[in-house]
Image: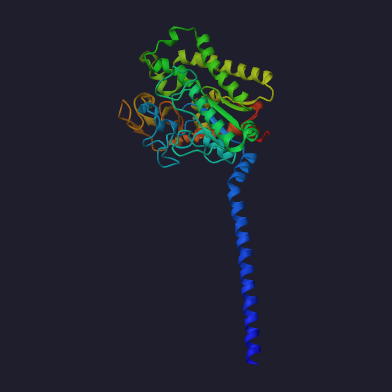
Amino acid sequence: MINEAMEKNLIMARLSSLFFISLFLHVALIATCCIGISQQQPKKHAAAAAAMAVPFFLFGDSFLDVGNNNYINTSTLDRANCWPYGETYFKFPTGRFSDGRLVSDFIAENANLPLIQPFLQPGFREYILGVNFASAGAGALTETFQGFVIDLKTQLSYYYKVESWLRQKLGNDDAKMTMSRAVYLFSIGSNDYMSPFLTNSTILHNYSDSIYVGMVIGNLTTVIKEIYTRGGRKFGFINLPDLGCLPGMKITKSENNGSCLEEVTSLVTLHNKALSKLLFGLEKRLKGFKYSLFDFNSNLRQRMHHPSKYGFKEGEAACCGTGQYRGVFSCGGKRRVKEFQLCKNPNDYVFWDSFHLTEKIYKQLADQMWSGTSNSHDVGPYNMSQLFRIH
């Protein structure tokens, strides 16, 4: 009986061992499969994200720069990395020339995208959702504030690097599809027309107004066509505001006595007409080319002249700066003039500093860009919402 019991226990032990060995092998096999799957996930996730997302690429100047100038060797005139910049929303300076967010931030939010990061931000190398190349002070002309900014041609060269990254990450076909789904937003030209009046440049003496505007538009055209050649099809544009009426421009000539600088205003008028004509022509000539042109000029003018209608108390003077209209570009105390005054509530003001706007007005303008209609003459032929939805 004892021997039978021992033999029975021995058999049971062997069966138990076999069960646990079998169970161990089964679990190991599952784990191995899971490891194999998890190792494939980043590539699959990247492809899935690329297939679903509409990337957002931004080119231009301080109206769109979210911090690229923080990472270049430039002057304090072209940086917004000190208090009180960013005080309203971020609570610290990010490099944005405002008290908070810019048009591009609100557009990204409406498109269910995260805040689009500056291309030069150290360690940032994930471009599937887009990237921001804009640089405060930049122009379409290489000569504009040369050596202190990232001009439009250089911004395009950065885009080439992103394109190469996308091809390596996704393959040629998926990369081109990603670039064709993307929306490209431009704000450029302001500095080309303001810089001759803010510096000792004599460039405007060498050309007629129409030829000079033609040079600016010509450089922009080249960049648009290059992006189109690489698959870009959906473009957004912001026309130029009445630069001669910015607080910082109104004080450049003492004889103006605070009136708008008409020499700049006339250049803006020529530019905006040429931009509209250019885009209309490109739509006719380039298959699949679609664009949204926002009338920044008239919308800003309405808020300057009728601030209370749009929830503001002050439409001409800046919140931050010094002198008449707070037009002296001293906000932050890091520039040539150290003295500055700061308003209590930026939401009461159209202008944040001598040349730039408050977050509140950027939000209003972004909402019009996003959902405005061509019937209202704010934006057309597409609004930004439609561009993001088109596949």
Asked if residue 365 can be seen in this view, the reply is no
Q: Judge left or right: residue 35 versus residue 344.
A: right
- Which residue is outermost to the bottom? 1
Asked if residue 2 can be seen in this view, the reply is yes
Residue 223 higher or lower than 79, as above or below: above
User: Could you tell me which quadrant the N terminus lies in?
Assistant: bottom right
Location of residue 338 by image quarter? top left
Residue 163 higher or lower than 245, as above or below: below
Q: How many marks?
A: 0
Most foreground residue, 223 or 134: 223
User: Where is residue 285 drawn, in percent x and y?
Assistant: 68, 18
Residue at screen point 60% across, 62% down: 28
User: Where is residue 55 drawn, in percent x and y?
Assistant: 59, 35
User: Where is residue 356 drawn, in percent x and y?
Assistant: 45, 28
Q: Judge left or right: residue 241 versus residue 377.
A: left
Most foreground residue, 250 or 138: 138
Residue 91 higher or lower than 146, as above or below: below
Colour theme: rainbow
Residue at screen point 54% across, 37% down: 127
Most foreground residue, 112 or 169: 169
User: Where is residue 344 drawn, in percent x and y?
Assistant: 39, 38
Residue 147 higher or lower than 168, as above or below: above
User: Could you tell me which quadrant the C terminus lies in?
Assistant: top right
